[in-house]
Amino acid sequence: MAQLEVGAEAPGFALADRNGETVRLSDLAGKRVLVYFYPKADTPGCTTQAVGLQEVLGRLGDTEVVGISPDPPERLARFAEKHSLSFHLLSDPDHAVAEAYGVWVERSMYGKRYMGIQRSAFLVGAGGRLEQAWYKVSPKDTAAKLLRAVAPNA
């Protein structure tokens, strides 16, 4: 799948959250939404990223944050509870949404090739179009990039 471009319509989704409730991108229409993809809950990089986003939530105005990974809802619930995460964490076990956003890619670790999530983040505008697309985003940089985009003077 090709990477999405700024200005493109954000692919919609309907995924289970940590409680098994369905969350749709359309449920958040009228607000800006950071949709970010991470490989696996409660790993060092993913924890750094999530905790960083949690720390800036109060400075984002009405911008919502949605984290998506292939993890099952039960794992997401443990991750959220352990790190006091209050934003949406959604389960994409068949990686269909990751594919729609162009972040389900071939990866390599220690010479082994496999398919997985490329850590990325997307700022969806209130009208449903992409305002920003950050592919291969660093866990430490996600919150700072989001803050610069939604509250440049914060």
Image (cartoon, rainbow, N blue to C red):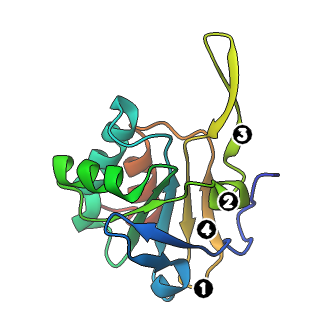
Q: Tell me: residue 93, above or below residue 62.
A: above
Give the label, 1 or 2, closer to the camera.
Answer: 2
**Residue at label 1?**
127
Give the mark nearer the N terminus: 3 vs 2. Answer: 2
Q: Looking at the picture, which amino acid does disc 2 mark? A: Ala
Marks 2 and 4, how far apart in space?
22 Å
Give the mark nearer the N terminus: 3 vs 4. Answer: 3
Q: Looking at the picture, which amino acid does disc 4 mark? A: Glu
Marks 4 and 1, how far apart in space?
10 Å
**Residue at label 2?**
96
Q: Secondary structure at mark 2?
A: helix
Mark 4 crowdedness (10 Å alpha carbons): few <14, some 14-19, many ≥20: many
Residue at 55% x, 85% y: name it: 26
| Most foreground residue, 135 or 45 | 45
- Residue 109 vs residue 63: left or right? right
Residue at 63% x, 54% y: name it: 95
Marks 1 and 2, how far apart in space?
23 Å
Q: Where in the figure is residue 130, as x and y percent of width and height?
A: 64, 69
Give the mark nearer the N terminus: 1 vs 2. Answer: 2
**Residue at label 4?**
131
**Residue at label 3?**
105
Q: Looking at the picture, which amino acid does disc 3 mark? A: Val
| Most foreground residue, 27 or 33 | 27
Give the label, 2 or 4, closer to the camera.
Answer: 2
Q: Looking at the picture, which amino acid does disc 1 mark? A: Gly
| For the residues bearing labels 2 and 4, Cβ distance under 8 angstroms | no
Give the mark nearer the N terminus: 3 vs 1. Answer: 3
Give the label, 3 or 4, closer to the camera.
Answer: 3
Q: Where in the figure is residue 136, as x and y percent of width and height?
A: 60, 39
Q: Where in the figure is residue 105, as x and y percent of width and height?
A: 72, 39
